Image (spheres, rainbow, N blue to C red):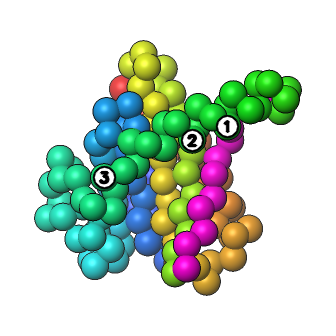
Amino acid sequence: MLNDVVNKKDGELEAIFIFDVSIGLPLYQISTDPEMRKILFGDNDIRYLSVALRDFRNLKQLSKALNSFGKSTKSGSLQYSIFVLQARQLMSYFYDLPHTPHTTVAICFVALIDVPIDRLVDLCENKIDQIKNELNKG
């Protein structure tokens, strides 16, 4: 279960969510911070589309553009992106679900800005394969 993968408290990640960029809706969320949870996910209703996440469906274009760049330059496909904001950072992996054609999800990790980027990468890299394995179970 995804809860087992992401529920292990490391104290540095504020939230993890999986967003279906193909249809523009969140599929899964967990947050250790009640205020952040309310901002991102409302009253724990997964169908709730917050203002903070409303435009995440546009991330598919970013993934498409970077994969096209990678293919054209023989650099390979997009592995992950890190977005640094003033107070937080977001690390996103784009993943095509193998059991659902034409479905791309963004697996997103949210941390405060004071978490060093190399630490954020380590935290996420330690969780991403487990999360992908759970998603592959369909």
Kindly indicate whether the residue at mark 2 contacts the one at mark 3 (C-beta within 8 angstroms): no
Kindly indicate whether the residue at mark 1 contacts the one at mark 2 (C-beta within 8 angstroms): yes
> With respect to residue 7, does 74 lie above or below?
above
Residue 86 x %, y %: 55, 79
Q: CA distance from mark 3 to mark 2?
A: 16 Å
Q: CA distance from mark 2 to mark 1?
A: 6 Å
For mark 2, what is the residue? 62
Q: Which of these two is toward me, 29 or 54? A: 54
Instruction: Check the image and name the residue furthest to the right.
Output: 74
Q: Amino acid at mark 3?
A: Arg
Asked whether residue 65 is in view, the answer is: yes
> With respect to residue 63, does 83 lie above or below?
below
Residue at x 59%, y 31% (from the top left corner): 64
Q: Secondary structure at mark 2?
A: helix
Instruction: Find residue 66 and name its label.
Output: 1
Instruction: Find residue 132 and name its label.
Output: none
Boundaries of the magenta span: 76-86
Q: Amino acid at mark 2?
A: Leu
For mark 3, what is the residue? 54
Residue at x 42%, y 58% (from the top left corner): 16
Q: Which of these two is toward me, 72 or 14? A: 72
Left or right side of 118 for 105: left
**Magenta span: chief secondary structure:** loop
Left or right side of 10 for 32: left
